[in-house]
Amino acid sequence: MLSKRMQDALNGQILIEAQSSQAYLAMGSWAEIQPGFDGVTQFFFRHSDEERMHMLKLIHFINERGGFASVPALEQPNLSFNSIRHAFKELLHHEIKVSESINGLVDIALEERDYATHNFLQWYVAEQIEEERLARVLNDKLEMIGDDKGGLYLFDRDILQVGMADKSTPQ
Ligand code: FEO
């Protein structure tokens, strides 16, 4: 059974995952109207779907542990960006915040001596290592590319492979 404190904290994470999904959905919509960024567009939409999956996992866990997962209201995310680089910077900052939030949940699980939730959260800890790493790799590439059109073309062409390769690389 979840403590009230643990349940509230996990419900807070539902909000963060939902906000992430919404933020990346908006990035996808923005990228879709930029000429020539089909790969980047797909990347953001896929990432948005992943965040929704992270949210659903939390919803099921809370309910299965005798709590009640509450579906939150969402604010409108940032809708437009100065550049692809700007969007990816926001993505990285967002993921860093998500990691901090997950770490906070792990602290609470330990304080509450809730080892089931602690165990459940380890999946998120591992996922955040990957997500932050991928976001940093993509930001580093964009930093190198700058405004070079050929570089941006290759970045867009290769982004889905980079994402998948990084996700399947063991630590
Ligand atoms: Fe579910 Fe990217 O944090």
Image: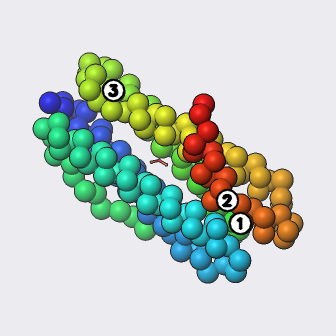
At which x and y percent is residue 153? 78, 69
Numbered label attached to residue 159: 2
Mark 2 Cα within 10 Å, few/some/many (few <14, many 20+)? some
| First of labels 2, 3 by sequence position | 3
Residue at 72%, 66% in the rendered image: 157
Circles 2 and 1: CB atoms closer than 8 Å: yes
Q: Identify which residue is drawn at 35% across, 62% down.
A: 74
Q: How many residues crowd around disc 1 within 10 Å: few (fewer than 14), some, or many (20 or more)?
A: some
Tell me what residue is drawn at x 34 percent, y 51 percent: 55
Residue 156 picture quarter: bottom right
The reply to whether residue 163 is visible in this rendering is: yes
Which residue is denoted by mark 1 in the rendering? 156
Residue on which disc 3 sits: 118
The reply to whether dot 2 and dot 3 touch (C-beta < 8 Å) is no
| Residue in view at x 57 percent, y 45 percent | 167
For badge 3, the amino acid type reads His
Local crowd size for mark 3, using a 10 Å CA cut-off: few (<14), some (14–19), many (≥20) = some
Q: Quadrant of the N terminus?
A: top left
Answer with the quarter of the image where residue 36 lies.
Answer: bottom right
Residue 78 appears in the figure: no
Residue 106, percent across and down? 38, 28
Q: Nearer the viewer, residue 67 or 151?
A: 151
Q: Is residue 57 above or below residue 27?
A: above
The amino acid beneath tag 2 is Ile
User: Is 151 situated above or below 113?
Assistant: below
In the picture, the quarter occupied by the C terminus is: top right
Dot 2: element: helix
Amino acid bearing label 1: Asp
Per the image, label 3 sits on a secondary structure element best described as helix
- Quick one: label 1 or label 3, which is nearer the N terminus? 3
